[in-house]
Image (cartoon, rainbow, N blue to C red):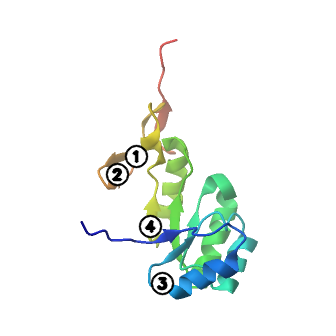
Amino acid sequence: MKCNILLFEQPVPKDDLMRMAQIRKATRIPIAADESVSTAQEALAVIRAGAADIINIKIMKSGVIEALKIAAIARAAGIKLMLGGMVETRLAMSCSLAIAIGIGGVDILDLDTPLLLSEDPLEGGYRYAGPTMSVWSEPGLGMRPISFPT
């Protein structure tokens, strides 16, 4: 079986940018910085070190405003963008998807963490259809909490 490896995500501890840069130079597979980037300053450090081809932005580690700053810095440096998540519900993933749609030019979306949850506490909003995410047309994020029996 052949596998198409799209990237190596955070192959070293977050503070070891020198080794991450060495790995990047030694392989043709793109290297994505994840834990190494929670702030705009950390994005600059990764870029200056030549440690990544891609920066994975997660709003749970950076917040929305800092995520937008990180995206602007990465773009200015010619670094690709990835939006991902920790293990959040579709509410947080909707915010990340809205950022991706709003800023455009996001190379990789890794917004599948709600699929790991046993129950979805929300209805409405975006939906998954295999590898495709269909966006909502309702106001806001288009979601409502589901009433679970007590």
Q: What residue did someone put label 4 on?
A: 108
Q: Position of residue 5 (x, y in %)?
A: 38, 71
Q: Which residue is mark 3?
A: 27
Residue 32 shows in the view = yes
Q: CA distance from mark 4 to mark 3?
A: 20 Å
Residue 13: give x, y in percent of width and height.
67, 66
Q: Which residue is mark 2?
A: 134
- Give, as a three-letter code, the residue at label 4: Ile
Alpha carbon distance from label 2 to label 4: 16 Å
**Quadrant assignment for the N terminus:** bottom left
- Numbered disc 1: secondary structure: loop
CA separation in Å, label 3 and label 2: 35 Å
Give the quarter of the image for residue 33. bottom right
Which corner quadrant of the image does residue 14 belong to? bottom right
Q: Earlier in the sequence, mark 1 or mark 3?
A: 3
Q: Amino acid at mark 1?
A: Tyr
Q: Amino acid at mark 2?
A: Ser
Label 1, label 3: how far apart the Cα atoms are: 36 Å
